Structures are given as C-alpha cells and as structure tokens.
Image: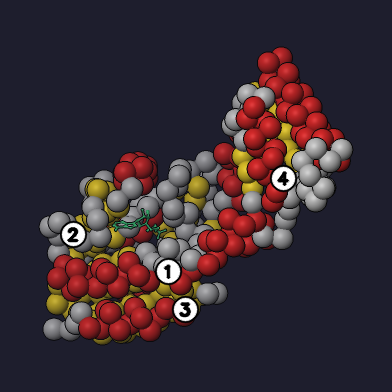
Amino acid sequence: MRYIEVSCETSETGIELLTAALDAAGISDTEVSDPRDVEEIMDKKESYEWDYIEESVVHKMEEAPRVSSYFPEGEEGRKQADTMKEVLQRVADDVKAGMYGPDVDLGSMKITEQIRDDADWKDKWKAYFKPFHVSEHLVVCPSWENYEPQEGEKIITIDPGMAFGTGTHETTSMCLALLEKYLQEGTKVLDAGTGSGILSIAAALLGAGEVLGVDVDLDAVRVAQENISVNHCEKTARAEYGDLTKGVDYEADLIVGNLMAELICMLAEGIAAHLHENGVFIASGILTEKEDMVEKAVTEAGLSLVEKQEKGEWSAMVFQKES
Ligand code: SAH
C-alpha cells in the first residue's frame, strides 16, 4: 500500500505545539521522532535494559526533532495531507507573529512530502540477504533464493520473518561455527532462544540425534517450526514455547544459547541441571566487556571454560560440564 508522508523538522518546543495543533485539526496519528528519546535510552545502559543499539539510532541523536504523519494515497488522504501542511504552516506563521510569546523557537520548520510504499519497508532487507558460507560446511540460504550446493555443503534455508536469526549477525555466526566444531553425531541438543530456528536446523543437519528449540516469543516458535519443516528436519528437531530451561523437561549433551549476558547468567544453574556429564554449553550474544561476568556465573554453576571467540564487540564462550 502507498502512503503520502508529510513530515516537518522542528525543535523540542515545536513537537508539543505542532502535535497539539494537529490534534485539534483531527490529525492525531502523528509519529514523533525526538533525539531526547535516544538519550534517555542511552542513560539506561547500566540498568541492563538493553545490550546493543543500532548505529543508525545513535545518529538520530544528531538530528532535529520531527513530526510526521502518513495518509493513504487517494482523494481523502490527499485532503488530509494538505490540511496537515496548512496547520503546520499556520503554527509557523503564528509563532512568527509572536502569538505564542517572544522566545518560541520552532527550528527550521522545513516541511516535506513524499510517497512511501510499505512493501519497500517490509522487504527492503531481503535484497541484502544472500546465500553465504557461515562455517566450513554450512551455507545459509534465504528461502527466496536458489543455491546449488557444492560437495560437502549443508544448506540451511531460512525465512526469519519477524524472528531473529538470519545467520548474518556475529553472535549467530559464531554459534554456527562452534556447533560445527563441538556437535557429535547422534547427540541431544537444546537451543535456548531459538528465534528463527537457525541453530536447531544447523544442529539437525550436522547430525544431532534430537533437537529441541525453545523460545518465549510465540511468533518465533511458529517461524522456527516452519523453517524446521522447510529444511526437512522435523524428524529430529522441534520448536516449542519455553522460558530458558524453566519447566523444560529435557536433558541434553549440548546446549546452545544465543542470548544476552544477563540472561546467560540467569540460565547458568538451569544449564548445569539440564546438561549431561561432559556436556557442552555454547553461550553467545555476550558483549566482550561482559565476558568475565558470564564466565563467573557459569563456572560457579559447575562448568569450566573451554574456548572463547570474539567477533567485533561480541563474544561466544564454550563451557563443559565437569564429570
Ligand atoms: N538462536 C537464534 C536467535 C537468537 S535471538 C540465533 O542465534 O540467531 C534470542 C532469542 O531468545 C529471541 O528469539 C528471544 O525471543 C529468545 N528469548 C529471550 N528470552 C528468552 C527466555 N527467557 N527463554 C527463551 N527464549 C528467550
């Protein structure tokens, strides 16, 4: 569907004045982009509410605040778009005339109009997701691409939908390479936080005897199960709703968790309880600065560190349960 986007660059004071005036004119569905929101999120880093922030979001801090709205392309939408532009212009004129007091600064008040197509937003990323080698034998292939496997290659076909896990992220690609290194034929695998199901599928293709992928996001569970079927792994692998290892009645020879450092620490006790003797735990999604914290929690739970890998700011760690 196509939309008319009307957007206005303003100041922090302008956000309130403009949204109030638009609201009064019946345009209440406005989108506000305020760099102060990003600042607020940045301030929360130490409270562990998030671990990673996209660079594009950080750049937003350098941009001016903006008020935008979208109207369906067509006669009615055209009218509303024109009304929005008139309201914005009227507020700008009123401010200039001093109607809001002497010191009100609305910023540049640059008004733009563009046609947007939501198909562009939904599928744009697909153009950049191409088949790629993620480890010696594993190739990840988007479900909409064709790839002719070479000898010895195993293909993971993925449509992540809204779930995390295309394999392109450092945290996932390290897990895939470590699975290839540590997984032994016929073993039982638990994939804690399966997302798109990519690690469960890889485990099945690498010869696991049984794989259980759990996730707290029901959409991810559905996507993972679909991807498991597309890869013909349903005899070995399945995806289910599950909160880490809580209430999960399953003992494994290998557990893989591409989560966040804090979640891995919370998971440590559960891992130890769900892992067979000499079993392996592959932990990923750890910012390098949080390695020590994870090592401490997991070793205290009775596992020992075997290997550590780093890619960019991310770290993956392999532990083994002592016998
Ligand atoms: N395994 C995939 C996805 C990792 S993203 C990959 O490596 O690419 C982490 C996933 O963990 C998300 O899908 C998220 O929904 C899930 N998750 C977060 N907290 C969880 C919890 N407490 N129990 C189970 N899954 C969880």
Q: Residue furthest right?
A: 97
On the image, the x and y values in percent for residue 162 come to: 45, 44
Ligand 1 sits in quadrant? bottom left
Asked if residue 116 can be seen in this view, the reply is no
Quarter of the figure with the C terminus: bottom left
Q: Is mark 2 within 8 Å of ligand 1?
A: yes
Q: Which residue is mark 4?
A: 14
Q: Earlier in the sequence, mark 2 or mark 1?
A: 1
Q: Amino acid at mark 1?
A: Ser
* Element class at badge 2: loop
Q: Earlier in the sequence, mark 4 or mark 2?
A: 4
On the image, the x and y values in percent for residue 128 come to: 61, 51
Q: Earlier in the sequence, mark 1 or mark 3?
A: 1
Q: CA distance from mark 4 to mark 2?
A: 49 Å
Q: Nearer the viewer, mark 1 or mark 3?
A: 1
- Disc number for residue 246: 2
Q: Quadrant of residue 42?
A: bottom right
- Count neighbours of disc 3 (C-alpha within 10 A) and say few if under 14, some if 14 to 19, many if 20 or more: some
Quarter of the figure with the N terminus: top right
Q: Amino acid at mark 3?
A: Thr
Q: Which residue is mark 1?
A: 47
